[in-house]
Amino acid sequence: SKDGNTGSYAFKTKDTVDKVARFYQDGFKASGLKTTSTISNTDGKTGGGMISGEVDGKSAVVLLGSEDGSTTVSVTFNSKK
């Protein structure tokens, strides 16, 4: 829109929740985003989580979940002009 860009996408991967979380945490930090994350563990296994990053009108949120041996990933991003 005239105010900026926004979008989202979702996918499944065979990578673990931990591996996907590290990928997005490292990417957010390398892009200069202030990053926060909440990762949940059950019985010693990572079950899911949320990673968010924000700086100067740019933001992104990644939701992670574990399902049937795969990781579900949902990413939403926003960039204001």
Image: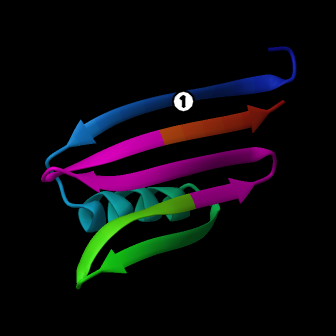
Quadrant in which the C terminus is drawn: top right
On screen, residue 78 above or below 63 = above
Q: Nearer the viewer, residue 21 or 66?
A: 66
Look at the image and say whether residue 56 sits in the magenta stretch. Answer: yes
Q: Residue at x 79, y 25 (%)?
A: 4
Please state if 61 lies on the left or on the right of 39 as rendered. Answer: right
- What x and y, as percent, mark residue 35? 60, 67
- On whether residue 72 falls in the magenta region, the answer is yes
Bin the neighbour count of mark 1 within 10 Å (Cα to Cα): few under 14, some 14-19, many 20 and up.
Answer: few
The residue most toward the bottom is 44
Rendered location of residue 28, percent (x, y): 52, 57
1 sits to left or right of 60: right
| Quadrant position of the N terminus in the picture | top right
Q: Amino acid at mark 1?
A: Ser
In-front residue for pair 62/67: 67
- Residue at 54%, 70% in the rendered image: 37
Q: Which residue is mark 1?
A: 8
Q: Position of residue 76 (x, y in %)?
A: 57, 38
Q: Is residue 43 left or right of residue 21?
A: left
